[in-house]
Amino acid sequence: MWRKILEVLIAIMGITYIFFIPEEPIGIKMVFKIIPMLLIIVFAFIQPSGDSKRYKLLIMIGLFICMWADGLIYWFIAGLITFLIGHIWYIFAFRHIKSSTIPKWVAVLLIAYGIAMVVWIAGTLWSEGESILAIAVVVYIVVILLMGWNAFQTGNKFAIIGAILFIFSDSVLAINRFIASVPFSDALIMISYYGAQFLFAYSIYAHYSASRKNLLK
């Protein structure tokens, strides 16, 4: 019952933040931005984990770090570094439950996408004389794609879809900030971002259920 209640609360508070909270005052906006993440962390905490307690712990650390990054993103570099650390924890988590190799077509798509984003976004920043920011963006792209790469190796569909949503969210954010204005960017970024974090939290239960079925077999 608590899981269902939390799912509804996460959806309500996410929609409230995205569509109803004004830009000012910034303090109120930051509070409402963080509330869905707090609920997602609680949601992750109540998931059964069985023998996968380490996976659950790593995911929860990643969620907690990303929650801090939500506030720090208003100071862009600080937020970028904090999200980078969050992605590293997700990589640790996904590597812990690695069950297969990444499909070749997925590997090709991720590499091609990464190269395209580096050339487009980091290349643009470099040409504008923002060399330090360009290097930071390259590092971030590499890390987030590694996160996606490792998610595909888990075989956990919730982790995989969450990773895809996270890559999409960060891509829209980068394009909107550095290249050109993206229509409905705030909604696109936050819906996919909250969706990614929720699916990472739900992947704890999905992994537990899959492990339990394998044991029963």
Image (tube, rainbow, N blue to C red):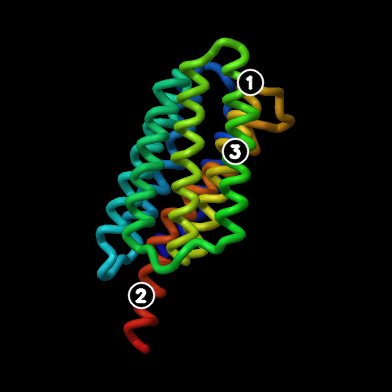
Identify which amino acid the numbered label 2 is placed on: Ser
The tag earlier along the polypeptide, 2 or 3, is 3
Q: Give the percent coordinates (x, y) of residue 82.
A: 38, 31
Q: Are marks 3 and 1 in contact (CB under 8 Å)?
A: no
Which mark is nearer the camera, 1 or 2?
A: 1
User: Which residue does the numbered mark 2 point to in the structure image?
Assistant: 211
Q: Give the percent coordinates (x, y) of residue 183.
A: 74, 30
* For residue 59, side relative to residue 163 (left or right): left
Identify which amino acid the numbered label 1 is placed on: Thr
- Residue at left offset 65%, top offset 29%: 120
SS of the residue at dot 2? helix
Q: CA distance from mark 2 to mark 3?
A: 36 Å
* For residue 185, side relative to residue 10 (left or right): right
- Residue at left offset 39%, top offset 54%: 43
* Above or below 119: residue 45: below
* Above or below 201: residue 132: above
User: Which residue does the numbered mark 3 point to in the structure image?
Assistant: 115
Q: CA distance from mark 3 to mark 1?
A: 13 Å
